[in-house]
Image (cartoon, helix red, strand yellow):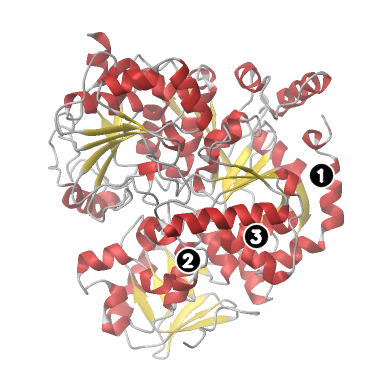
Amino acid sequence: MTAPSFPFGIIPQVEGRAVVLAGDDIDTDRIIPARFLKCVTFEGLGVQAFADDRAELQGRHPFDLENYQGASILVVNRNFGCGSSREHAPQALMRWGIRAVVGESFAEIFYGNCLALGIPCFTASHDQVLALQAAIQADPAQTICLDLGGLQASTAAGLSWPLELASGPRQMMLTGQWDATSQLLANDGCLQKTAANLPYLSQF
Amino acid sequence: MSAGTLYDKVWDLHQVAELPGGSTQLFIGLHLIHEVTSPQAFSALKDLGLAVRHPERTVATVDHIVPTTSQARPFADPLAEEMLATLERNCAEHGISLQAIGSGRQGIVHVIAPELGLTQPGMTVACGDSHTSTHGAFGAIAFGIGTSQVRDVLASQSLSMGKLKVRRIWVDGQLQPGVYAKDLVLHIIRSLGVKGGVGYAYEFAGPAIEALSMEERMTLCNMAIEGGARCGYVNPDAITFAYLHGRPFAPAGDAWDRAVAWWTSLASGDQAMFDDEVRFDAAAIAPTITWGITPGQGIGVDETVPTLEQTDPDERPLAEEAYRYMDLQPGSPIAGVAVDVCFIGSCTNGRLSDLQAAAAVAKGRHVAPGIKAFVVPGSEQVAAAAEAEGLDAVFREAGFEWREPGCSMCLAMNPDRLEGRQISASSSNRNFKGRQGSATGRTLLMSPAMVAAAAIQGKVSDVRALLQS
């Protein structure tokens, strides 16, 4: 088994084919049903993404359509990733091959979980997302480029759509500083100062 | 921009530094962990060669995967056994206190931390579980995190966070008999939508909120996340302090008085400014129940399933999906819908007062033929307190099963689950497709008293009628 190349370092852009998953309020229980959370590593989650939705649609789920195999960009609608905080959801998407998500809006915890994995979640207006989804559905084979610097999605044919990405996450991706652990550890002196001022850590 | 709110004060106190990307490093006062979202975080820590920064501020329990019939080890499910064994090993290795099965302190993480007095006003509380918002009931800023963030808190006792806006949800009036905190929060989510709280912390305030017990406040804050708000909170007051007094990890002696003075100072003042405010009238709220596949698809028990015409155009595709999945007709009454399984428990409604409210309905009555009904206390302490007042006997005599503590049928990570197209009346928090363990199973969310009423009648029923008779 070859190791997939997960996000690493500076992320100036994400380029690849895209998969459209239409619908609002797609929760993390649907992205990865709870029975697959019975694991102590994330390794096997890729093939389990959307397991129940895919079973229900018997091969007609976007993640099963031949056109969309190998896609690395997921285009969704509103409030994607709501519900449970399980990081198993973005882990499953990442292990299926997703490296960036574009949508109208995202649930907060899901968004943060993606950021921690180096998966940017871009937003765009309702009309722009619908236009992007239509373009992808018309030609699933085309390559889409999501540019974090210029904040747009574009195709080789010259089509483009404006994207948004909050300045914090954008800077983190562009400078390769989206993996927070080392930054947090670097400030241990400040952390001790903050802790020293908290009444509940010193018998009030 | 909000100012002078409890959220602002607690946020400011816990700020460590500004991080390069512009987000804030926030100190975490209490880190709660459990068996599902921590193993990969401990593995990452090991790979990085890091220790746990504050093991004494980290508390573990086991809840999601525990069976509720027999909790003898090893568990019948080898995967569940492996998860608990991994948690035990990680806690032992890093000096973290694990509230083990049989210790008298085990239970659902959001039930045990408050009852042990671990959760206190003015703290930041993080846990790899979205219902961490529960702890906001104490005037803590509490939120769910993913496993990478669990790793970060283990390693550094802090998180990279962005500040939220604050919406005050002001509730006037008083909840009517038979109407509970669960109905209030389902009503709020129905009104503001499941996306309405994205980007916000919810401050619950006003006369109706001040009148709620701590357990009711926990139910309310628990479901802030279902309204899209990552955290919800209630300002600490005399009810908060009375609940905390004398609990194992609450301050005692002189420290208690100093703590109360500090906690009191944290409440949002009269001059506090909010980014948004919404008002509700508690007296106008009926027992509320979900009919669809998101917690926002709720109606009063005396209402009918909304038609497409009655539904906001944006929400119509989801409504159509819900009609199909739930097999409910638009325009039909929700009362009278037959149920198969009745579940009382979960971090939303698995506390003593929840069981008391359900037992008051069940007492002297019997579960309808063909209905599977069971009660799962939220913790070993809840179970002991309920048994001490004979609630287990009330439930058993009424035909309910009385189980061991755990998350049970709120989610499908243990043997408790729906089968096939079964439809449940459930006191839990999520009615997502497949949530209760069958890909085609259906969930109606409601209060514990309403679940008991459904069990007795075999169908969705207005609990107020049973309480009067």
Q: Splitting the image into 4 quarters, where does residue B103 fall?
A: top right
Mark 3–mark 2 CB contact (< 8 Å): no
Amino acid type, callout 3:
Arg
Mark 2–mark 1 CB contact (< 8 Å): no
Residue that appears at 49% across and 37% down: B222
Comparing B256 with B43, the one in front is: B43
Q: Quadrant of the N terminus of chain B?
A: top right
- Mark drawn on residue A195: 1
Comparing B270 with A37, the one in front is: A37
Whether residue A167 is visible: no
Q: Splitting the image into 4 quarters, where does residue B339 fall?
A: top left
Report the residue marked by disc 2: A90
Residue that appears at 45% across and 82% down: A154
Q: Please tell me whether residue B361 is drawn above or below residue B88 in the rendered image.
A: above
**Residue farthest bottom in this picture:** A156
Comparing A182 with B83, the one in front is: B83
What is the secondary structure assignment of the residue under circle 1?
Answer: helix
Chain of the residue under label 3 = B
Q: Nearer the viewer, mark 3 or mark 1?
A: 3
The reply, left or right, for residue B388 in relation to residue B243 is left
What is the secondary structure assignment of the residue under circle 3?
Answer: helix
Discs 3 and 2 carry the same chain letter: no
Residue B347: % across, % down: 46, 37
Amino acid type, callout 1:
Ala
Report the residue marked by disc 3: B151
- Distance between the Cα atoms at labels 3 and 1? 19 Å
* Earlier-in-chain disc, 2 versus 1: 2
Residue B396: % across, % down: 30, 23
